[in-house]
Amino acid sequence: MTDRDTCRMVENMQLWVYGTTAVVDTVLLFALLERHNWRAVTVWMLLLAVGVWCWHGGTFVRFLVDRSVGPLADPIRWFSMFSMAFGLMLMPSAALHGTLRLLQHQSFSVACKPDPRLTLCYLPLVLLAPIGRSLATNPAEPFLELLVNYHSAYVVWLSFVSGVTAYGLVHVGAESPDVIQRRFFQSLAASMLVIALLADVFISIRPRSPEMAAWLQPIVGVSPIIPAVLFGYFMMRFQLLPLILERTLVYGAILMGAMLFHQLVWRDAVSQFQDRYRLDLGVLEGALALTVILCYQPLRSRVAEALQSLVDSSAERRYERRHLAVQLAARAGDPLPNLVDWFTTTMQRSFGSDLAAAWICDRNRCVVERAGASKLLEDHQVGPMLAAIARTGDHFITRYSTSEPEVLAFLDQIRAGALLRFEHSDVCGLFLIGCRPWGQPPNDEELHALALLVEQFGVTLQNSQLQAMQLAVEHRVLQNEKLSALGLLAGSLAHEIKNPLSSIKTITRVLAEELGSDSPHAEDLRMISGEIDRLAASTSELLEAARPPRGDRPPIPLTELFSPTLRLLHHLAREHQAALDVQYPDDPIVMSIDQIGLREIVFNLISNGLEAAGAGGTVRLIFRNDSDSLVIEVLDSGPGFSVEQQSRLFEPFFTTKHCGTGLGLYIVARRVRELGGQIECQSIPHQSTTFQVKLPRNVPTADSDRR
């Protein structure tokens, strides 16, 4: 290979290197300028990216027009070299600006108040005027040859800035409790020192060994991109690297397409113009097409979407998430806790996140269920968080897409990937997804897929709730049908039993009279008569439970109303070896109410209380006068009920007894409703239970209702 071929190969390599870095710089600069990154980007960082872009872009254009001739060649060469000089002067100034801010505020936060004194960092830019004149003397000369008088001063300036920057980064990083942040500062400090060292070596060996300097020049020229990418990475985290990779491939594909179009279509037509001016129009056409796409956002988005599938390796994950959507729809009938736990665990595993959490709320934004790392938010914080996200108008937010202070503080504190919300008529909630093990948040495609899954999850919860309500209504209808049938059966059965019992009782009485009291069978006949009376009373209760309440309600004093019932209850208390205490109000109360229904209420509550209290227990019956109402309280010292049992006490067929039917308290609650009253139960497990019945003292009769 001849020296000319070697030189040509080195030039082509440099052209490729600077073209690639120019594309990467363009991607980085546009990423920093995007609106959702403004809260993380400082002025000095933006200027640093501009400086790197000017240096690499100017170098790339300078190589393109190196052998061009004609009236436009020298102005283009001068402009490209002036851009190179501007970038070289701007990069150290922006780095020094950022370092001094870091030493002042111990962070790169954009919230820090600007300091006008830091504009002195850009004082070296005044040298651009004489540098521009030097470049205009002979633009065809190499860039470094035209600025040979500035080499030493620039190396000293760059070394000074690199030293100060390295000191500031190491000093602040040593005080940071975050290990990752300390390593980042150390890496950034090392990169600044390496850049200064490479520049010193390049300038020193260039006069003595031009060939070695030619091989070293691309490395020195590309090295400024390292701190720029590191700064951008630190501020935007793992969103930056996939973004640079994706868009670099996209923009590179655009350039290659334009150059291929030029070679196949325009080459012969413009070959004479290219030979005349020694200018590669293929590259210029590609750069022009890229500029149009970059400046027109809709076109830029469409091109990115079209080419993204070429580098997308998430087809398997997309299939898995579609399968999850099918599974979610199939689990609509699962209980709420099981469904929420399954969804949270599955989403965390599918997206490879370090954490996930879910908070489910009712229509009043009160938390009813939670799963995953839900301890990150207290119950009283979920409602305001939902309201804050709703104000943004989005269904999901990240640390880079929101300005809500409370949401931003929460996401920054836990370094979450995204926070998503769903809201329907009867159910709403939040879903939190974390980052991958290395801190990478979900990308845009994953966020949209996650948002769809979370929205479907909300719809599933809403459907599940509606389905549960429907089942509850169907259950109540079925219970009512059973009770109606039971009432008819009880009425028929009681009616059929009542007449034979009367005959049996009559025969028993006749036998007792004929045998006399001295007969050895007299005691047996008295026992038979007592059992007949008990069975007759039971059939009467069945008839009372089956038939609607009667309308005859003559006024009667309270003491007279309950005297027979209380005598029987005192006998029952002695059988249970329990104490029964009855307290009447000081003022006499006259009731106009269904007497049989009221006696049944008291009898059932007292008998249940005596059974619960057991031997040595106590039951208290308290009557109180409350305005136009009668308040009846039954307190027993029994074991009480759990919270779940209390919620079902008045349901039909629910019982806590081994041999109970589950109809006693249901009938009591039904009688209370028929009398226009209310009943409540307050129970302390293993201590006591209190039933409180509140009844109006004057209930209109059925006849008065018709009148």
Image (tube, rainbow, N blue to C red):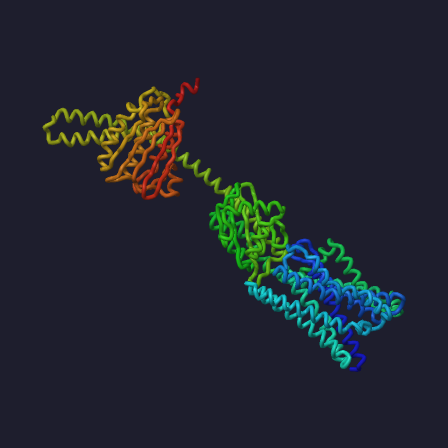
Identify the residue at horizontal 51%, vertical 55% (top origin).
345
Determine whether, in the image, residue 506 is placed left or right of residue 261.
Answer: left
User: Which quadrant: the C terminus?
Assistant: top left
Residue furthest front in the image? 117
Give the x, y percent position of residue 19: 75, 67
Residue 127 in sight from this viewpoint:
yes
Give the x, y percent position of residue 29: 71, 60
Placement of 269 over or under 683, stated as above or below: below
Identify the residue at horizontal 54%, vertical 45% (top origin).
383
Determine whether, in the image, residue 253 is placed left or right of residue 655.
Answer: right
Residue 310 in sight from this viewpoint:
no
Q: Nearer the viewer, residue 321 or 179?
A: 179
Q: Nearer the viewer, residue 229 or 305?
A: 229
Determine whether, in the image, residue 505 is placed left or right of residue 296.
Answer: left
Identify the residue at horizontal 40%, vertical 27% (top origin).
676
Residue furthest left in the image? 518
Placement of 377 over or under 284, stated as above or below: above
